[in-house]
Amino acid sequence: MADGNPTETLQELAAGIRACEACQLCAGRLQAVPGEGNPRASIMFVGEGPGAVEDEQGRPFVGRSGQLLTEMLAEAGIPRSDVFITNVVKCRPPGNRDPLPEEIQACRRWLDRQIEAINPSLIVTLGRISMSRWFPGGRITRIQGQVRNIDGGRRAMPLLHPAAVLRNWGLRSEYAGMFARLARLANEPRPDPASAEDDLSQGTLFDL
Ligand code: URA
């Protein structure tokens, strides 16, 4: 594994992901979708799993949800090429079902290594599935936009999945506001890596 050069490390990880057969999702994929973006991004988006268009193109968030994500980023003044975008599972679940716990677990090592290589200061989860890693037991509709310090001197912020906004267009302006908030947050100094992770049971989620 390349050491210290995130571009090379991500290329090596992408090759590993494309060849991965660690769970049953590899059987139904056209191709794996490792993720894309700036290897030194300060903001990393983590969605659920590729859909049909992503499976065809091998790129994350390029279908209708992706178009909305790209639009939200543009409105917040964030070029899509500045961030890194990936998913909890890198292969399309059949029929777009939720990824199973064992599939998420099998794929976790790839996501962990991507986070380590990119070292983002902010991880933005898109939807319930990726939220549950950093906000276990959280209700997305209640905690959207709140922030917690996580390991590695970074923060995590849960957002609705863009598909939820496409289903309920009334949520769009609030959603756009969330992107404006995350753009501000990404410019703030990182939390002290030596400070412990927030303990959710102590109610340490905070609003910006
Ligand atoms: N939905 C996701 O969660 N990820 C994608 O890449 C596309 C749609």
Image (tube, rainbow, N blue to C red):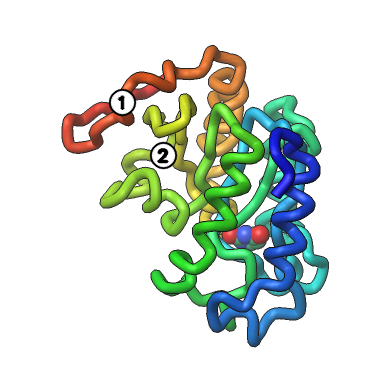
The x and y percentages for residue 150 are 40, 33
| Left/right of residue 20 with respect to residue 98 in the rendered view | right
Asked whether residue 165 appears in the rendered view, the answer is no
Q: Is 140 in front, or is 175?
A: 140
**Residue 87 location, quadrant:** bottom right
For mark 2, what is the residue? Answer: 144
Q: Residues within 10 Å of mark 1 (few under 14, many from 20)?
A: few
| Left/right of residue 70 with respect to residue 163 in the rendered view | right
Q: Nearer the viewer, mark 2 or mark 1?
A: 1
Task: Say if disc 2 is inside 8 Å of ligand 1.
Answer: no
The x and y percentages for residue 164 are 52, 56
Residue at the spot x=63%, y=65% of the render? 90
The x and y percentages for residue 24 are 55, 83
Is mark 2 in CB contact (under 8 Å) with mark 1? no
114 relative to 183, above or below:
below
**Residue 196 location, quadrant:** top left
Determine the CA span between mark 2 and mark 1: 22 Å
Q: Amino acid at mark 2?
A: Gln
Check the picture and name the quadrant holding the C terminus.
Answer: top left
For mark 1, what is the residue? Answer: 196
